[in-house]
């Protein structure tokens, strides 16, 4: 699932940006996991 993976990464990245620095590390962990 390459397409869905990219979409999820974009969504999580934008979500992290919305939340702020507090979500930066968890977002990276989620993206890698």
Image (cartoon, rainbow, N blue to C red):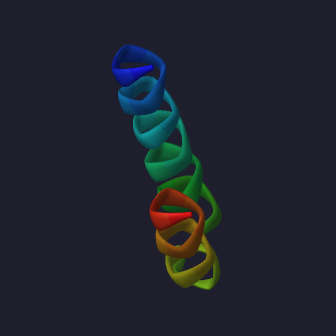
Asked whether 16 or 27 is in front, the reply is 27
In the image, 4 versus 24, the foreground residue is 4
Q: Residue at x 53, y 83 (%)?
A: 25
Residue 10: x %, y % from top left? 40, 37
Residue 26, given in percent of the width and then of the height, sits at: 62, 76
Q: Residue furthest front?
A: 1
Q: How many marks?
A: 0
Say left or right for 9 vs 25. Answer: left
Which quadrant is home to the N terminus?
top left
When asked about the image quadrant of residue 16, the answer is bottom right
Camera-side residue of 8 and 18: 8
Q: Is residue 12 above or below residue 28?
A: above
Residue 2's place in the image compared with 30, above or below, is: above
Left or right: 7, with 26 as reference point: left
Above/below status of 28 relative to 22:
above
Q: Position of residue 20 (x, y in %)?
A: 56, 72
* Quadrant of the drawing holding the C terminus: bottom right
Q: Residue at x 47, y 71 (%)?
A: 28
Q: Residue at x 46, y 65 (%)?
A: 32
Q: Position of residue 8 (x, y in %)?
A: 52, 33
Q: What residue is shown at x 45% (from left), y 51% (from top)?
A: 13
């Amino acid at each position: 699932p390459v397409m869905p993976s990219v979409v999820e990464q974009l969504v999580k990245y934008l979500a992290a940006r919305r939340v702020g620095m507090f979500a930066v590390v968890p977002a990276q962990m989620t993206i890698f996991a």
